[in-house]
Image (cartoon, rainbow, N blue to C red):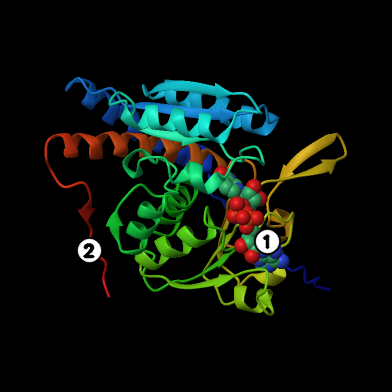
Amino acid sequence: MTLLISPPPALARDIDGKAISARVLDEVREEVLALAEEQIYPALAVLLVGEDPASEVYVRNKLLRAKEVGIRSLEHRLAENASQNEVLELIAQLNADASVNGILVQLPLPAHIDEQAVIHAIHPIKDVDGFHRENVGGLVQGIEVLTPCTPSGCMRLLRETCGDLSGLHAVVIGRSNIVGKPMATLLLQADCSVSVVHSRSVDAPTLCRMADIVVAAVGRPHLIDASWLKPGAVVIDVGINRIAGESGPRLVGDVDYASARTVASAITPVPGGVGPMTIAYLLKNTLIASQLQRAVQLGGPQVVSVPVSG
Ligand code: NAD
């Protein structure tokens, strides 16, 4: 008698954000060394208001990585009860200081401070988060501007995984200003057909099952499982959710990794996928900011147009 045993399903390969971000950081380090020969030393100012424990960890990691690639970092701390004017005054000083190339305000800010007013007080050419409306508009128009770090990092992961993205159907789940919208814009610039799924979408799993590329940026643990995915889809999980585990709290993504990898062809783990790319692209943006500022000092164009095909 012959027993028919079906082979276990092939599992998706991991997209190694740690390894790819290490390459991005190497590229930044090399360019920082080249700038040093011209007596240019890129510097990033990080502003933390209050003592939010998660923000403390993020800031510490950013400063550590900056040091590793030779970018000078300047840490500015204001008390939880600092007034909005104090924050705006500090930003005005940093804007005026030619030795500061990038300004990052760690979000979220305390509730009494208007986050938008703070973001838009940063000079667009020093806005390494890419959140200023001038940079957002430039991104949509296909102009080379400072672009949000997480979506930029996701694009690098996708390019290294898929090569040319042209013609692929990408579904972005989430439409925030920080991740979802800029992600959709970058995918469009890479000639993907792009759908954006959000909290009001009807039958999100069906829309998602049409996608070659799925980028999940929702903030809901394990929302997306194998039933949302087309066989062979490439999955980028931006979500970072803290849930209770057997041995204490642990981090999980928006995607149910164990389930999704039975259907996808490649997937980012959480942690170790998108997270390290965000910091790497923050430092890359600091480098780009110093190059853009140099171009302005030399009297060149402030922004460089890049062709966007129709
Ligand atoms: P957000 O809360 O601003 O936006 C969430 C989006 O999800 C919204 O646009 C909403 O319409 C959509 N949404 C909510 N419920 C939905 C549902 N049931 N189906 C489909 N869409 C739904 O969040 P954000 O700032 O974009 O962050 C999203 C996640 O990414 C969070 O977990 C955050 O922690 C994480 N994040 C990670 C990094 C990183 O470096 N890895 C960076 C930024 C954000």
- In the image: residue 79, left or right of residue 145: right
Q: Is residue 203 left or right of residue 125?
A: right
Q: Which mark is residue 289?
A: none
* Along the viewing direction, whichever of 12 and 293 lies nearer the viewer: 293
State the residue position of label 2: 307
Q: Are marks 1 and 2 in contact (CB under 8 Å)?
A: no
* Residue 67, quarter of picture: top left
Secondary structure of residue under mark 2: loop
Type of amino acid under label 2 = Pro
Q: Earlier in the sequence, mark 1 or mark 2?
A: 1
Which tag is nearer the camera, tag 1 or tag 2? Answer: 2
Identify the residue at horizontal 31%, vertical 41% (top origin). 125
Tell which of 42 and 104 is nearer to you: 104
**Secondary element at tag 1:** helix
The image position of residue 289, as x and y in percent, is 31, 38
Dot 2, how many residues are within 10 Å of its Cα: few (below 14), some (14-19), or many (20+)?
few
Can residue 11 be seen here? The reply is no
Type of amino acid under label 1: Ala
Residue 172 in the image: above or below residue 54: below
Where in the figure is residue 34, as x and y percent of width and height?
A: 22, 26
Q: Quadrant of residue 126?
A: top left
How crowded pointer 1 is (Cα within 10 Å; few <14, some 14-19, many 20+) is rated as: many
Answer with left or right where residue 105 lies relative to residue 301: right
